[in-house]
Amino acid sequence: MRRLCCTALLLVGFGALECAGAEAPTPGAQSVAEVYVDPLGADSNPGTASAPVKTLPQAQYLARVLISQGKTGVTVILGDGTYPLTEALTFDYTDSGTRNNPTVYKAAESASPIISGGVAVTGWTQEKAGRWTAPVKGLRFRQFYVNGARAKRARGPFPEGAERFGELKAIDADAGFLVPEKSLPPLHNPADLELGFYNSWSHMIARVRDITLEPDGRKRITMQQPGCFLVCRKEGVKAELPAYMENALELLDEPGEWYHDVEEGCIYYLPRNGEDMATATCVAPVLETLVSVRGTLNEPVRDLRFEGITFADATWMGPSDRGHADVQANCVIEPTNLFERDGSLVNLHNEYVMSPANVQVGYTRRIFFSKCTFTRLGGAGLDLGLGAQECEVKACTFTDISGSGIQIGCVSRDGHHPADEGMVVCWNMVANCRIHGVGVEYEDSIGIFAGYASCTLIERNEIYNLPYSGISVGWGWGEEDSGGGNYPIPFVYEKPTPSRDNRIANNHIYHVMLKRQDGGGIYTLGNQPGTVIEGNYIHDNEGWPGGIYLDEGSGFIEIRRNAVHGAHTPMNYNNRAQDRINTCNEHDNWFGIAPEDPAFPKEVAANAGPQDKE
């Protein structure tokens, strides 16, 4: 299949990609040099097994020295414990190994090393009404953990009887909401307040500018711009009246809630049952990027592996700075490159900005993550971004993540019509992973999201307990495809996008769509010639339609031998414009057949999900 896929890419003008016909690295390659690191070590040590260094930056320095001396197969072995970072651990082409002798960062035998971007919060004192407070001066964060469990930012329902005010015709419009005076108590820091909106598949956040009292006794909540302008004018589902308000001391009234007073430099927390703040382990995640593996077009990072490592305790401050004008799948509209269509604002060619991940990979060849854990993260878990080629994510766990689990490709101009073949996101694999409990903070997050990508293999993953779709592949609603799509846009492309030859196979997807609508266990957008959806077992999903969903622009996709039950609509088409539905081939599936039915395909169900014997 490899050679066939990249031959197809040649036909559409992307040139001879370096990854064409690539073979897997030779297994069992021997290391010629080792560096040992342990939280109990010392950075003055030589990094041997008996005298390990203490920090990962020092271990990386020693590994780079060995690589510069011509050593290949350098392995950094991490002892048990937590490795706190004060800045992102960044890898570039100087960290590269070779195909047969990659550079490896791995857990020592029986060890569970954690790379953490968090800061311990100590010095707690008890306040009134059961609250506790501690100093956090100079820190910024949107998440907080007590004994490893995520706490909840102080939140309450938005007041009833609210009305909108202001004409949102300009990006600096004076607009917001009027509420009854007694429905909103005086706030200590009104400009800290955030308002959240839910509409169908979308979850949006806008920040408050100030709150004043009107002559008629109502309170006037004036919103920050351009955030409110964007969430109320964007295409698709728009913000109407808020569903909740968040991030005020006055809302802290339930066990497990917290509030960060940035101005005073302290945090307030109401403990959950059984939590003793005198002994509790409290962590504020402050780094936005834990690990960055980023090369360039001319010097990609090659042959780097991470094995058995936990990536934890990172945040993402974008919504605190500018709100979250979400369009879909945690991609947000920006106040640039806009045009108006039917009264709504659209970024040209749906070129939105993806919410970033806390572990980022881009312009690389053969970056592998094996048996790693991504948890307690405030962005997405892992990005395989522009130029990520031949990367593998295998037997990893993604859980307790604010955004999506894994993001592959992007949704920008460089994604749908890259200027250089080295920017194409291709030949990446996500296999045998368990993805659950993601989208904790942003409710339209995805288990595995792939934007513009080719030759992507997503197989044998278990995906469950998500607020929105399990797997989403493709982007653009057809607009960026050759000749354009169903919507009028200022100009169209004649060349197709790189989206093609993706395979979504043998995944077990259940209990997704728990909070949002208009998504599915597997969801697609845009033309994707050669793409196959097969052997997946999808069941018991809450929101509509919930099964396999070919949305707008989806074309040239084959759907075969899937079992779907317990969904509102096991197979849903919304790709009839331009007759694209007839380019797709659906056959030999089992839709709506429950396990107790003799016709239920037991072999499909048994074959779906991770194969632990690997």
Image (cartoon, helix red, strand yellow):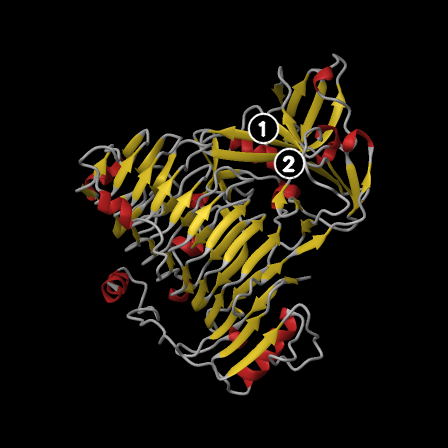
> Which percent across, then down, holds residue 438?
50, 44
User: In this view of the protein, can residue 556 be seen by the observer?
Assistant: no
Q: Secondary structure at mark 1?
A: loop
Please, is residue 582 above or below residue 11 in the view? above
The image quarter containing residue 223 is: top right
Q: Disc 2 marks which amino acid? A: Gln
Q: Foreground: 389 or 345?
A: 389
> Which percent across, then down, holds residue 12?
27, 59
Q: CA distance from mark 1 to mark 2?
A: 10 Å
Q: Which mark is residue 332?
A: none
Please, is residue 328 above or below residue 496 in the view? above
Tag 1: Cα neighbours inside 10 Å, few (<14), some, or many (≥20)?
A: some
Q: Are marks 1 and 2 in contact (CB under 8 Å)?
A: no
**Sequence-first disc among 1 and 2:** 1
Q: Foreground: 589 or 296?
A: 589
> Which percent across, then down, holds residue 115?
60, 61
The image quarter containing residue 204 is: top right
Q: Which residue is mark 1?
A: 168
In front of the other: label 1 or label 2? 2
Q: Foreground: 31 or 193?
A: 31
Q: Quadrant of the C terminus?
A: bottom left
Residue at (28% x, 55% y) in the render: 501
Q: Disc 1 marks which amino acid? A: Leu
> Which percent across, then down, holds residue 580?
24, 40
The image quarter containing residue 471 is: top left
Residue most toward the bottom? 69
Tag 2: Cα neighbours inside 10 Å, few (<14), some, or many (≥20)?
A: many
Q: Is residue 506 left or right of residue 491?
A: left
Q: Quadrant of the N terminus?
A: bottom left
Q: Secondary structure at mark 2?
A: loop
Q: Is residue 331 left or right of residue 139?
A: left
Q: Which residue is mark 2?
A: 225
